[in-house]
Amino acid sequence: MPHVELIMPKMGESIIEATILSWTKQVGDTVEVDDTVLEIATDKVDSEVPAPVAGTIKEIRFGVDETVAVGEVIALIETEVGAEVSPSPSLAPAGTESPSPADSEASSTHVAPAAPPASQAKNEAVAEEKSGNGRFYSPLVRTIAATEGIGQAELDRIPGTGNGGRVNKQDIQAYLKRRDNRFITGPGKAAPTAGINATTLPPRPPVAPVGSLASGSSELIEMGRMRKLIADHMVQSKRTSPHVTSFIEVDVTDIVTWREGIKQDFQQQYGEKITYTPVFIEAVARAIKDFPMVNVSVDGDHIVKKHDVNIGMAAALPTGNLIVPVIRNADRLNLLGLTKQVNDLAARARAGKLKPEEIQDGTFTVTNVGTFGNVMGTPIINQPQVAILAVGAIRKKPAVMETEYGDVIAVRQLMFMSLSYDHRVVDGFLGGSFLRRIGDYLEAFDSQRTDV
């Protein structure tokens, strides 16, 4: 019987691997075209992988919780002789060419050589990924180990936090950070190990099992997958970008007055709730057009200037984690268009229904810390962007106002805004001027505005 290779799909330009969350089909199960075979997770979004052809699951090569590189074969689907077996283009790894019609015809009629029994094939596959002591290692972990000059004996001593004590990508990366310097002679190369064996290596401290109590008043809780990814991103961002944060206080009384006056009619007319977020994003998009060098990323010694204004908005999930869906070409949308995008993306983010492409290619991010009652914050840059804006809670305060009759004290609606920026490419003048321009647009908001 001919068979089709089911490969790990590429979920975006920056995605090089994905973790298998669950298999919805098992060896021996039949599938139809577009049936969900497994669920995967990247550092951006969870997704389902459909079957490219109809047939029977012949082999599954990776288990749950394993991290697999994009383009790796993760399963084989056995098809009937004469069936179309070319994989769907959406599942082909980036950089590969679609098969020609002649190739497709040849593959659909080709009968593969008799395969060994399933148990034998499974044992051979497992043997390739296990060490002499029977411990499992994914191909990705073995690749990292080979690149960093980690031998088998050293690899076997790395504590694992994956399923069954497996070593995952995060485990080996954490190990590399704390690795004994006397074993390193240069980036990614191990020092000569002549005269060094397992008995002369410094002993590793015992690792407490997950869920055990460190003391009578402490509990050890394992991070969830998304929390681990967020933690890695935050640490990486701080290591990559020298963060500087500027603050301003903005008078948004006219915006509050306008929203209170039109919110009911707005919902009746357009079927959408109007919040402050679209107004903030509108001001940010206008300010980016005035200061385009904030809308950039860094590539080595080069600055990549982005012509599209794709604004990400941090959205809180029911789990307490955050995700950043992206409003593409925000500068081309009117206030109604921004409102529809904000409401739709926020609702689907909470429901876990965002598509991978909807959280990619952002060029600037806005986070509303005021949602949690915070007056200000110092957010961490969402790499590879170079700036992120935080808006605080709107509060009534006494403020000094200049009038034609002199200064007066009045109750105003005030809000703090903070901009964290990458000081490699955004200096204080640019960052401060950009932030002030956002504030100017908000303070100039027309409380009698009718166009949306």
Image: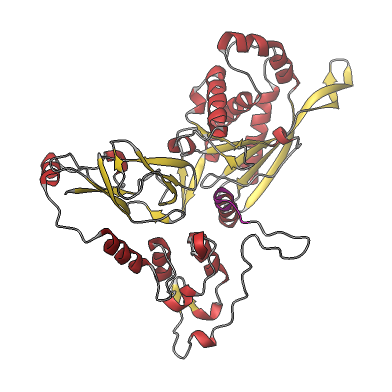
The answer to whether residue 84 is above or below residue 439 is below
**Residue pictured at 30% horizontal, 66% vertical:** 124
Tell me the quarter of the image containing the C terminus.
top right
Residue 418 locus on image (x, y percent): 69, 39
**Residue pictured at 64% horizontal, 68% vertical:** 208
Give the camera-side residue of 148 and 31: 31
Q: In this rendering, does residue 366 appear at all?
A: yes
The answer to whether residue 63 is above or below residue 202 is above
The verdict on residue 120 being magenta is: no
Which quadrant of the figure has residue 313?
Answer: top right
Q: Is residue 12 left or right of 344 when viewed as pictured?
A: left
Figure coloring? secondary structure
Residue stretch in magenta: 222-229
Q: Is residue 105 left or right of 36 when viewed as pictured?
A: left
The answer to whether residue 253 is above or below residue 35 is above
Residue 258 locus on image (x, y percent): 70, 15
Residue 64 locus on image (x, y percent): 44, 53
Which quadrant of the figure has residue 247?
Answer: top right
Count how many numbered circles sit on residues in the image: 0
Q: In this rendering, does residue 151 appear at all?
A: no
Farthest bottom residue in view: 195
The verdict on residue 223 being magenta is: yes
**Residue pictured at 55% horizontal, 65% vertical:** 174
**What is the magenta segment's predominant secondary structure?**
helix
Q: Is residue 306 left or right of 128 when viewed as pictured?
A: right
The answer to whether residue 231 is above or below residue 401 is below
Give the camera-side residue of 7 and 212: 212
Give the camera-side residue of 113 and 197: 113
Give the camera-side residue of 76 and 16: 76
**Residue pictured at 15% horizontal, 42% vertical:** 104
Residue 396 locus on image (x, y percent): 82, 26
